Amino acid sequence: MVKKKPDSVVWEEASDSYVAKLLPYASSVSGPLIEVPNVDAFKRKGVEKASKILSAELEELQSRIKAFVTEANNTQRVYAAAYKFEPIVGETYHLYEGSSGDFLSIIPPSQWQKPHVGSYRLTSDFKWEIIPNE
Protein backbone atom coordinates (compact mmCIF):
# COMPACT_ATOMS: atom_id res chain seq x y z
CA MET A 1 0.00 0.00 0.00
CA VAL A 2 1.26 3.47 -0.97
CA LYS A 3 1.66 5.78 1.96
CA LYS A 4 0.09 9.19 1.18
CA LYS A 5 1.87 12.34 2.38
CA PRO A 6 -0.14 14.94 4.34
CA ASP A 7 -1.52 17.95 2.44
CA SER A 8 0.94 20.33 4.09
CA VAL A 9 3.91 18.48 2.57
CA VAL A 10 4.85 19.42 -0.99
CA TRP A 11 5.72 16.09 -2.53
CA GLU A 12 5.93 15.37 -6.22
CA GLU A 13 5.15 11.81 -7.21
CA ALA A 14 6.80 12.08 -10.65
CA SER A 15 10.23 12.99 -9.28
CA ASP A 16 9.71 11.25 -5.94
CA SER A 17 11.03 14.26 -4.03
CA TYR A 18 10.05 17.31 -1.99
CA VAL A 19 9.57 20.36 -4.21
CA ALA A 20 8.65 23.11 -1.70
CA LYS A 21 11.96 24.91 -2.18
CA LEU A 22 11.37 25.08 -5.95
CA LEU A 23 7.99 26.76 -5.78
CA PRO A 24 7.77 30.52 -6.46
CA TYR A 25 5.16 30.88 -3.70
CA ALA A 26 4.70 29.84 -0.08
CA SER A 27 3.43 26.29 0.28
CA SER A 28 2.53 26.33 3.97
CA VAL A 29 0.54 28.48 6.34
CA SER A 30 3.71 29.62 8.10
CA GLY A 31 5.31 30.71 4.83
CA PRO A 32 5.98 34.37 3.95
CA LEU A 33 3.02 36.58 3.06
CA ILE A 34 2.59 37.05 -0.67
CA GLU A 35 1.29 40.47 -1.57
CA VAL A 36 -0.12 41.11 -5.00
CA PRO A 37 1.22 44.44 -6.25
CA ASN A 38 -1.37 47.14 -6.87
CA VAL A 39 -1.27 47.68 -10.62
CA ASP A 40 -4.25 50.03 -10.72
CA ALA A 41 -2.02 53.13 -10.66
CA PHE A 42 0.14 51.67 -13.43
CA LYS A 43 -2.94 50.88 -15.52
CA ARG A 44 -4.42 54.33 -14.94
CA LYS A 45 -1.15 56.03 -15.95
CA GLY A 46 -0.83 53.80 -19.00
CA VAL A 47 -4.38 54.54 -20.11
CA GLU A 48 -3.83 58.30 -19.69
CA LYS A 49 -0.58 58.26 -21.67
CA ALA A 50 -1.98 56.04 -24.40
CA SER A 51 -5.09 58.23 -24.65
CA LYS A 52 -2.98 61.37 -25.05
CA ILE A 53 -0.81 59.76 -27.72
CA LEU A 54 -3.79 58.34 -29.60
CA SER A 55 -5.62 61.68 -29.42
CA ALA A 56 -2.59 63.48 -30.86
CA GLU A 57 -2.32 60.91 -33.66
CA LEU A 58 -6.04 61.24 -34.38
CA GLU A 59 -5.77 65.04 -34.62
CA GLU A 60 -2.80 64.68 -36.97
CA LEU A 61 -4.72 62.21 -39.15
CA GLN A 62 -7.75 64.51 -39.23
CA SER A 63 -5.62 67.46 -40.33
CA ARG A 64 -3.96 65.31 -43.01
CA ILE A 65 -7.37 64.17 -44.23
CA LYS A 66 -8.60 67.78 -44.41
CA ALA A 67 -5.47 68.77 -46.37
CA PHE A 68 -5.97 65.80 -48.70
CA VAL A 69 -9.62 66.69 -49.32
CA THR A 70 -8.71 70.33 -50.01
CA GLU A 71 -5.97 69.28 -52.42
CA ALA A 72 -8.29 66.82 -54.18
CA ASN A 73 -11.04 69.46 -54.50
CA ASN A 74 -8.60 72.05 -55.85
CA THR A 75 -7.17 69.59 -58.35
CA GLN A 76 -10.60 68.47 -59.47
CA ARG A 77 -11.89 72.03 -59.85
CA VAL A 78 -8.91 73.15 -61.95
CA TYR A 79 -9.02 70.05 -64.18
CA ALA A 80 -12.77 70.63 -64.68
CA ALA A 81 -12.15 74.23 -65.80
CA ALA A 82 -11.93 75.22 -69.44
CA TYR A 83 -8.53 75.98 -70.99
CA LYS A 84 -7.08 75.62 -74.46
CA PHE A 85 -3.40 75.20 -73.65
CA GLU A 86 -1.25 72.55 -72.00
CA PRO A 87 -0.18 73.75 -68.54
CA ILE A 88 3.53 73.54 -67.71
CA VAL A 89 4.65 71.94 -64.46
CA GLY A 90 5.76 74.55 -61.93
CA GLU A 91 4.04 77.49 -63.62
CA THR A 92 1.34 79.60 -61.96
CA TYR A 93 -2.11 79.86 -63.49
CA HIS A 94 -5.20 81.75 -62.44
CA LEU A 95 -8.72 80.38 -62.18
CA TYR A 96 -11.62 82.67 -63.01
CA GLU A 97 -15.39 82.35 -62.90
CA GLY A 98 -17.03 82.74 -66.27
CA SER A 99 -20.62 82.80 -67.49
CA SER A 100 -20.38 79.18 -68.67
CA GLY A 101 -18.16 77.88 -65.83
CA ASP A 102 -14.63 78.22 -64.53
CA PHE A 103 -11.71 78.83 -66.88
CA LEU A 104 -7.93 78.81 -66.44
CA SER A 105 -5.71 81.62 -67.68
CA ILE A 106 -2.15 82.88 -67.50
CA ILE A 107 -3.34 86.48 -67.05
CA PRO A 108 -2.93 87.59 -63.41
CA PRO A 109 -5.92 89.08 -61.57
CA SER A 110 -4.21 92.48 -61.29
CA GLN A 111 -4.41 92.84 -65.09
CA TRP A 112 -7.95 91.53 -65.55
CA GLN A 113 -11.27 92.48 -64.00
CA LYS A 114 -12.86 89.00 -64.03
CA PRO A 115 -14.06 87.26 -60.82
CA HIS A 116 -10.87 85.55 -59.59
CA VAL A 117 -11.28 82.16 -57.83
CA GLY A 118 -7.63 81.55 -57.02
CA SER A 119 -4.12 81.07 -58.32
CA TYR A 120 -2.77 77.55 -58.77
CA ARG A 121 0.53 75.86 -59.58
CA LEU A 122 0.80 72.49 -61.34
CA THR A 123 3.06 70.16 -59.34
CA SER A 124 5.32 67.47 -60.75
CA ASP A 125 2.80 64.79 -59.80
CA PHE A 126 0.14 66.69 -61.82
CA LYS A 127 -1.80 67.93 -58.83
CA TRP A 128 -2.88 71.55 -58.57
CA GLU A 129 -1.80 73.37 -55.41
CA ILE A 130 -3.37 76.64 -54.41
CA ILE A 131 -1.06 79.64 -54.08
CA PRO A 132 -1.97 81.93 -51.19
CA ASN A 133 -2.93 85.49 -52.12
CA GLU A 134 0.08 87.73 -52.14
Image: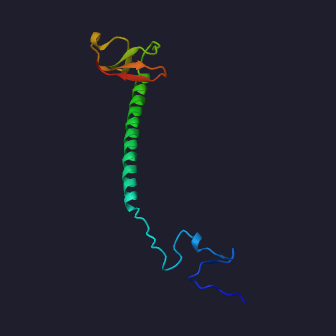
30 shown above or below 105: below
**Quarter residue 42 falls in:** bottom left
**Which colour scheme appears in the figure?**
rainbow
Left or right position of 28 against 116 = right
67 is higher (above) or lower (below) than 81:
below
Extreme residue in the right direction: 1
Q: Residue at x 32, y 22 (%)?
A: 132
Q: Which residue is painted at 36% across and 52% down in the image?
A: 48
Residue 59 at x, y percent in the picture: 37, 41
- Quadrant showing the C terminus: top left
Q: Residue 111: x and y, percent?
A: 28, 9
Find residue 22 and report its image quarter: bottom right
Residue 115 position in % (x across, y down) = 29, 19
| Residue 20 pos. (x, y %) | 58, 74
54 or 11: nearer the eye? 11
Residue that extends furthest to the bottom in the rendered view of this protein: 1
Residue 66 drawn above or below residue 24: above
- Quarter-wise, where is residue 71 in the image? top left
91 shown above or below 55: above
Q: Exactly how many numbered labels are in the figure?
A: 0
Viewport quadrant of the N terminus:
bottom right
Q: Return the residue nearer the eye: 79 or 129.
A: 129
From the viewer's side, name the closer residue of 100 and 54: 54
The residue nearer to you, when weighing 100 against 4, is 4
Residue drawn at x 38%, y 18% as measured from the top left: 103
